[in-house]
Image (spheres, grey):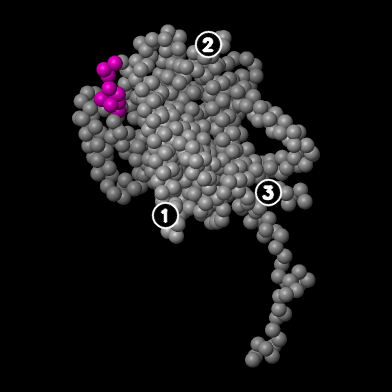
Amino acid sequence: MAHAAFIPEVTTGTRSIRAGTLPRTAGLLWCVLVLWLLLSNLIVPSYGITRYETWAAVLAGTVVLALTLAVPRLLNLLDRLLTRRWMRVLASVLGWAAVFAVLARLADAVRLPPDWDAAAVYYSAYGLADQGVPEAADRAYFQINPNNLLLMLLLSKYLGFAEALGSEDLRQSVAYLNAGLLFAGMLLTYAAAALLGGRQAARLTLVPSIILIVLSPWMTVFYSDTAALPFTILIFCLLVLSAGRRLPAGLLLWAAAGAAAAVGYGIKPTVLIVLAAAFLVVLLSVRRAAWRRDLPAAVLSMAVAAGAFAGTNAAAGAWSRSSGVPADGVSPAQQALPFTHFLKVGAQQYPGPNGDYYGSYNEEDRTETLQITDPAERLAAGADAYRERVTAMGPWGYAAFLNAKLRWITGDGSFFSWGEGRMTAGDFIADDPLSRSIQEFFGPGRPGFGVLMSLWQGTWFLLLALCGAGLFLRGPPLDSREVATARIALLGLFVFLLLSEGRARFLYLYLPFFIVLGSLSLQKLAAAARRARRRPPLSGRNRRRDTPPPPSPAEVVE
């Protein structure tokens, strides 16, 4: 009985609406692509800054799979022991509080001095909070990189608040902020799975979330990747909640999703892909028999979300301009790196420590772009360089390059941690005994880093395998609009990274999507395996009574 209660039949927490044929087909194509990326990286690994042993990653993934399946069973047993509802609620609150306490302690132990772009964000935010004048910020940086301006301004408000509360170590306060954002992402991942597949699907997210979010490869430094992670899954949760609701409540949820997308977009532009995917799915899922009702509802929902996005984005832009960073009279549109620069960077490769880097940051390209002062010429120069590089590769060469690039981006379960700037595992700030013990597992060259790297890589391979398994699984909620939205959003992210500058770090803010989709596939697979075990054999004493006997020889002759 305990095993039977392990993972019940698939039940959804919200009303599941079937996606249209085109969105479902696009989602299945994404599953095919994921399977290719997984299998090709298992056979010929594509390493980031750190090498891993494939056998160790596969072994770790197998252990993670066993733990992922065991945790819901243990929690079900605990539910039966706690007979009162208030006891279960208290146990849940204490459990989540323990998770946050561990996450906060880990973030404090492994924090590093800010480096690369994260340094400009932190020190500008600190200067703005401490001195209160825009000149304290690195204006030149934000003129070139206005995409990080909102993040810096939000961080400066947080630092000012922490200082007002008496914080004596603002770097530690930022580490706790990073932990809080990751914890919010884990909670929302759990909630999204619960909304789609019920409590057991949510519990299947716990082990992967602990390994890749609580033990995050990116908890060492605060930057847009961890800051934006809660926004992608928050938007998704709001869209799931809106499914099947009447217009007043549904429109409010769409508006909230649009507003959240605007804030997330200001922190990390790729957050917007979630909302764009939702628009495509809802528009392409209009039922032919009910188009008079479905089409106006879809258009109205999209209009409300777009309006909320535009209004919130305008408000954020006005606040950014009023901050004085960049200076009055300086237009970010004229100083910022144009999108053609990122196309140019995305079409080159160079040797890395463990193989080639594809479409990654290139200092020479950046310097070359910034030497051109005229915005129009800068835009055209990037397009020309991109065209020249693609032409030099040829059609087949460029296709092979894109394949290698996407394999490289998706093949790194550490998400390119320790690959940016000059970050090293010898620069940890905390020096107390417990922190030093924790640090032994973080960073290349540390004694325990190989174990943690194998856990990250094995869990990532497991998630890719489960997401790809969706190709062979049907029924709710995998055929729903919400699952199609998640898959198309990830497909859109892949396409963006294929064309633009990219590396595995840019996948991290969408990690909750992989975890949710993986949990839904695992729930389906576990249910199918249980049904197969329960199915009686069709011979001997177990043959059903209504099964006709085999024909006699005479009947066969006739």
Nearest the camera: 9 or 419? 9
Q: Quadrant of residue 391?
A: top left
- Dividing the image into 4 quarters, which one contains the C terminus? bottom right
- Answer with mark 3 or mark 1, whichever residue precedes in sequence: 3
Q: Which mark is residue 163?
A: 2
Point out the frontmost of discs 2 and 3: 2
Q: Name the secondary structure under disc 3.
A: loop
Residue highlighted by disc 1:
292
- Badge 2, how many Cα within 10 Å: few under 14, some, many 20+? some
**Residue 328 visible in the current orientation:** yes
- Badge 3, how many Cα within 10 Å: few under 14, some, many 20+? many
- Answer with mark 1 or mark 2, whichever residue precedes in sequence: 2
Q: Amino acid at mark 1?
A: Arg
Query: Pointers 2 and 3 in contact (CB under 8 A)?
Result: no
Image height of 347 relative to 428, above or below:
below
Image height of 491 relative to 150, above or below:
below
- Mark pair 1, 2: CA separation: 56 Å
Task: Residue 553: give x, y in percent of width and height.
Answer: 69, 88
Q: Name the secondary structure under disc 1.
A: helix
Residue 336 sits inside the magenta stretch: yes
Image position of 30 (left or right of 393): right
Residue highlighted by disc 3:
7
- Mark pair 3, 1: CA separation: 40 Å
- Answer with mark 2 or mark 3, whichever residue precedes in sequence: 3
- Residue extent of the magenta highlight: 328-337
Q: Name the secondary structure under disc 2.
A: helix
Image height of 500 relative to 170, above or below:
below
Residue 541 sits inside the magenta stretch: no
**Residue 116 visible in the current orientation:** no
Task: Residue 41: give x, y in percent of width and height.
Answer: 48, 45
Q: Residue at image x 58%, y 34%?
A: 186
